[in-house]
Every structure is written in C-alpha cells, then in structure tokens.
Amino acid sequence: AKKEKTSARRAKQDLASCKNLLSCLECHEHAWPFLLPVNTKQFPQYKKAIKTPMDLSTIKRKLQEGSYKHKGEFASDVRLIFSNCEEFNEDYSPVGRAGHCMRQYFEQQWAQM
Ligand SMILES: Cn1cc(C(=O)NCCN)ccc1=O
C-alpha cells in the first residue's frame, strides 16, 4: 500500500507542477502566438501544412480532463507547439522568434521540474 500511495502522491505533484508551468507559459510576454489554436480562416494553408495542431489552451483542457498519464506526455504536447511553429514560420519572423524564445524558456523550466 505504501508504494502505490507514493506513486499516487507523485502523480498528484506532477499534475500540479505541469499546471503551474503551463500558467508560466501562458503569461510569458512571447506566448501570444500560442495561446489559442491557429486561426485556419486567417491562415488557410495551416490545416494542410500542420498535421497535429497544438496550443496552450488545448494543453490546459487536456490537463483539466486528465488526458495526460505521465508528465512526459504534457511535455510532448508543449514541444509539438514549437515544432509546428518552426515548420510553418521563418526563424526570424515575429512568430518564429517567439517560438524559439518560448521553447528555450520551457526547456529551462522543465529541466528544474
Ligand atoms: C502559432 N502561429 C500563430 C500565428 C498567429 O498569427 N497567431 C496570432 C494570434 N493572435 C501564426 C502562425 C503560427 O504558426
């Protein structure tokens, strides 16, 4: 019983840490391109170019719904945001630069979790 309890406690702690890190990402100065799904009316080619769209609001919903079994799955979705961004945007475009900045910030915070 002891082992399961600690793993349940660790899962609870991991979820809290992921929620906290997500909040930090959402309020980051350069988070603006990633807060909501890319508007495919504004960017009609996005749907064809990017097979698995991802954004911070979707990750937030998934966290709340308990969609992530391990914190690594959370990290994979965050990284998906930034790989989609690199695929669709030039490195030195405003969105491209925001993506590089946010990825660096995320990896720095993730390493301390
Ligand atoms: C992630 N991403 C965001 C945008 C964008 O312009 N977002 C505006 C939000 N108001 C464009 C391309 C892209 O890949």
Image (tube, grey):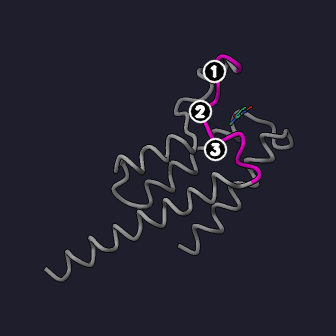
Mark 1 lies on residue: 40
Q: Residue at x 44, y 60 (%)?
A: 72
Q: Spatial distance from mark 1 to mark 3, Cα to Cα?
A: 18 Å
For this view, does 62 lie left or right of residue 25? Answer: left
Closer-to-camera residue (10/92)? 10
Picture quadrant where residue 104 is located? bottom right
Label 3: element kind: helix
Cβ(mark 3) to ligand 1 < 8 Å?
no
Magenta stretch, main secondary structure, is loop
Mark 2 lies on residue: 37
- For disc 2, the neighbor class at 10 Å (few under 14, some 14 to 19, many from 20) is some
Q: Is label 1 in contact with label 3 (beta carbons under 8 Å)? A: no
Q: Residue at x 67, y 54 (%)?
A: 27
Q: Earlier in the sequence, mark 3 or mark 2?
A: 2
Mark 3 lies on residue: 83
The stretch in magenta equals 29-42
Examine the rendered structure and indicate whether residue 90 appears above or below residue 59.
Answer: above
Amino acid identity at mark 3: Ser
Where in the figure is residue 110, as x and y percent of width and height?
57, 67
Q: Is residue 65 magenta?
A: no
**Numbered mark located on residue 12 in the image:** none
Q: Is label 1 in contact with label 2 (beta carbons under 8 Å)? A: yes
Picture quadrant where residue 84 is located? top right
Examine the rendered structure and indicate whether residue 67 appears above or below residue 2.
Answer: above
Amino acid identity at mark 1: Thr
Where in the figure is residue 85, as x and y percent of width and height?
68, 40
Looking at this rendering, what residue extends furthest in the bottom direction? 2
- For disc 1, the neighbor class at 10 Å (few under 14, some 14 to 19, many from 20) is few
Amino acid identity at mark 2: Pro
